Image: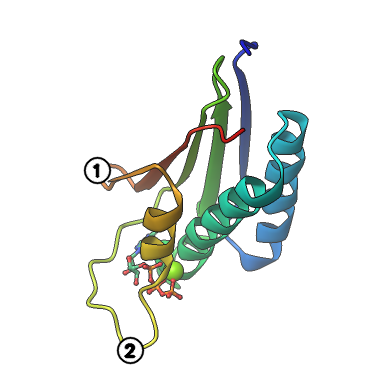
Amino acid sequence: MSRQPSVLRLRCPAQSRFVASLRHALVSFLRAHDFKGQQLDDVTTAAGEALANVVEHAYTAAASQVDAYIGLRANVDAKGTLALEVYDGGAFVERRPTRGRGFGLRIIRAIAGRLTIDTSNGTRLRMIFERKR
Ligand SMILES: Nc1ncnc2c1ncn2[C@@H]1O[C@H](COP(=O)(O)OP(=O)(O)OP(=O)(O)O)[C@@H](O)[C@H]1O
Ligand SMILES: [Mg+2]
């Protein structure tokens, strides 16, 4: 089925208390585009890991609370393919995973059809989900 491309754009402070609202808004948007069941859960899980990473890793404690933001952009194209971006204005932290950590990006890689990470200007994760029928 061919439809009109549609975009959701959100931006809020990079604090954990805003993450649930971002997730809920994303789920409502995706439901309105007929995402459901396992695929809806998968996208929500991947988004949750990316959002948690911004809150935990993107900004130093000294960063201004005003400038520290999370951005989310969800684009559903005419074929129903979802491009989901989670981005921030902080700095990507290269770190060896410690025991019991380092699963978030692996989970996203396992779930999303494609993942790219651009760290040239803040951090921008771009995840592609082909529509499952
Ligand atoms: N938005 C981001 N800004 C800065 N660094 C990031 C960001 N996202 C990920 N990272 C870096 O990549 C590492 C790996 O992220 P990943 O989500 O896989 O593991 P984690 O967050 O350390 O642990 P877990 O997700 O298992 O709780 C992080 O520890 C961090 O150093
Ligand atoms: Mg993580």
Q: Which residue lies furthest to the front in this view?
A: 133
Report x, y in % for residue 97: 28, 79
Give the image quadrant in which the ligand numbered 1 is located: bottom left
Instruction: Estimate how packed mark 2 is, as few (under 14), some (14 to 19) or many (20 or more) residues with alpha carbons within 10 Å.
Output: few
Depicted 63 relative to depicted 130: above or below: below
Report x, y in % for residue 8: 64, 30
Quick one: SS at disc 2? loop
Which quadrant would residue 92 be assigned to in this image?
A: bottom left
Instruction: Estimate how packed mark 1 is, as few (under 14), some (14 to 19) or many (20 or more) residues with alpha carbons within 10 Å.
Output: few
Report x, y in % for residue 5: 59, 15
Q: Which mark is residue 99?
A: 2
Q: Which amino acid does label 2 sit on?
A: Arg
Residue 15 shown left or right of residue 104 in the figure: right
Q: Which amino acid does label 1 sit on?
A: Ser
Quick one: SS at disc 1? loop
For disc 1, the marked residue is: 120
Q: Is residue 59 visible?
A: no
Q: Nearer the viewer, residue 45 or 50?
A: 45
